[in-house]
Amino acid sequence: MDGKKQQGLRDDDYNAGTIIVLKGLEAVRKRPGMYIGSTDGRGLHHLVYEIVDNGIDEVMAGYAKNVSVTINEDGSVTVSDDGRGIPVGMNEEEGKDALEICLTDLHAGGKFNQSAYKVSGGLHGVGASVVNALSKYFVATVEREGSIYRQTYHIGIPDGPVEVIGTSDKTGTTITFYPDDEIFETTVFDYEELQYRFRNQAFLNKEATIFFEDKRVGRSEKFHYEGGVSEFVLYLNRSKKAIHDPPIALAGERYGVQMDIALQYTDGYNEAVDSFVNTIYTPEGGHHLTGFRASLTKTINDYGKVNGLLKDTTLEGGDVREGLTAIISIRMPDPQFEGQTKTKLGSSIAQKAVSSLMNEKLAEYLLENPAVAAAIIKKSIFAMETRKALEKQKRTLRKGALESNSLPGKLADCSEKDPAKCELYIVEGESAGGSAKQGRDRAFQAILPLRGKILNVEKARPDKVLDNEEIRNLMIAIGGGIGDEFDVAKIRYHNIVIMTDADIDGAHIGTLLLTLFYRKMKPLIEHGHIFLAMPPLYRVSKGKKEAYAYNEGEMAKALEEFGQGANVSRYKGLGEMNPQQLWETTMDPETRLMKRVEIEDGMLADQLFSILMGDDVDPRREFIIEHAHEVINLDV
Ligand code: 0RA
């Protein structure tokens, strides 16, 4: 540790406890990724979530009602709650104020706060001390026991002892922090990102009111939803047509697990079932989701059989989940997480609890609401019939394709056979397709030109999807099948590149393709096989000198380099490039730019596709143009 990092420490502070704390802070600053995931924008926003989660914990424990978050004009963030206030007062054992211990000792959180259903300290919950260590400046203010206490820190090290700065008859905690720009790639907070998180948290904690203000732009809003998870489901269905209203709400406690479940069927074909444990999103599911699914299938089948609505048929899980939007929110002590991203609930008691509650309460609901029950069963039977029609269609197609061993006529395949080395370019338009065929390296690059726009699968009945020739060609060329049984191990290309014009139609075609991949071949995206080609936007030239620019900055730089008399032309479409240019700028692995499509948040991606593609696409063009960047990257 250098001298600067020890600022604010007096010699007599330098006891064994201090050394441990300094070691801890040093570890956090050395490997911030270990504590907050990353040091990019994501990690930056994580700092806010850590602090807000502490406030939400106070709400969940029944001590607070309000949490307010402000992005200050100088870019710092202030989080305030009206909970009990972080404990203050000398801790004899450690020889330090409890407040200081809470905010500097990595392991202090749990020692002081024993609340049962904690968010913080849970999955990624690393506590306020990590935020402190990664902040160039951090101020904690506590109102408690009649006084206002304050302590300030630099990179986690106290500037001095806890001070009393006034009196107060309230309780609560206020923290302001300035993320350290030596640690983070960016320190600029994104309003939409924070807004999305706070809104979800408010839906999941109906007792909480979250105030959010951005002083940089003078924008503010309040999140408070008395309706809790039911209101969450209504919100998720805001651009869809529900077949019953209000949502079905099931709540209760079993085996020490508190459950809040809401479900509503729509006339669409997608399933949007999202689950949470102690308000932590569990995109990988786990035992709570398993219990939900099993009980939903069983309860609906039982009801249908007993009431003569289902004769000699059994509905499958997928049939009863078609068009379903649901939120499963459970709270339990000490949940265990597993899975690739540690977002899968591994506590098996949750399955017992959820299925027990559902078996009882959903059956009861169906009995009391026969019209809704009949509508759900009718919809599920229809889903079963379309599923069977689709299976038959796939069998015929497979037989046909296998027997003739034929790939689509329009596909210009590559000679390489190892999928890991192969690339498929999906190209907008026959003419750009022609250029790509001439310009490509045929050893490993295949070209599939698309004629016009593919079907919007968001709106289409599942058994109509394969009636679309372009989608059939795509499916056969890619080779992994489509829908539930899509098998990523069978794909013929590991890089699948969408190459469209940089205009409105191009953005639209790109979005239609992404919708197809997201809804019908999701593992392609999850395994990182989908890319967007990034053709240059400009060509800068002077005499024989020329350069391609992929953005405005590069264009300006080239202009400066070439000096007076340089020309700029804007590429509007792929068709403006000859095969050689297309290869050099967009297809040559040595020089091209590509973006990998990633799903950061499945729940958000679902909303994005349902809103963008759910209704007539035309009125949404403007939205697509405005948000082309986010839409295409799926990481709004
Ligand atoms: C430890 C113990 C107690 C409360 C808290 C921590 C606490 C931490 C934060 C962080 C942000 N807001 C917070 N509010 C409370 C319980 C103290 C008691 O028993 O009075």
Image (spheres, rainbow, N blue to C red):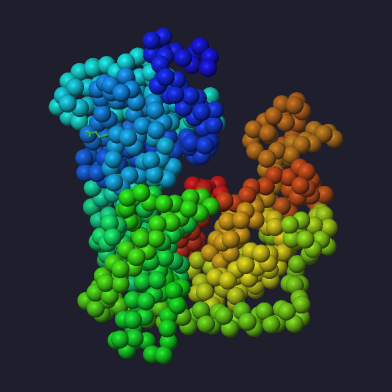
- Which one is nearer the viewer's eye here, 345 or 47? 345
Looking at the image, in which quadrant does ligand 1 appear?
A: top left
Q: What is the count of numbered marks?
A: 0
Residue 118 lies, in percent from the top left, at 33, 44
Examine the image and state in which quarter residue 239 appears: bottom left
Q: Is residue 41 shown left or right of residue 380?
A: right
Name the residue at 24% across, 61% down.
Answer: 252
Q: Is residue 135 above or below residue 634?
A: above
Examine the image and state in which quarter residue 475 appears: bottom right
Q: Is residue 74 above or below residue 3?
A: below
Residue 14 lies, in percent from the top left, at 42, 14
Q: Is residue 484 shown left or right of residue 305?
A: right
Residue 201 lies, in percent from the top left, at 34, 47
Name the residue at 59% across, 54% down.
Answer: 507
Name the residue at 69% across, 71% down.
Answer: 476
| Residue 257 in sight | yes
Residue 340 lies, in percent from the top left, at 53, 52
Q: Is residue 402 above or below residue 233?
A: below
Q: Is residue 503 shown left or right of residue 438?
A: left
- Which one is nearer the viewer's eye here, 519 or 172? 172
| Residue 218 in sight | no
Q: Is residue 568 shown left or right of residue 137?
A: right
Q: Residue furthest top?
A: 11
Name the residue at 17% across, 20% down.
Answer: 167
- Which one is nearer the viewer's eye here, 463 or 261? 261
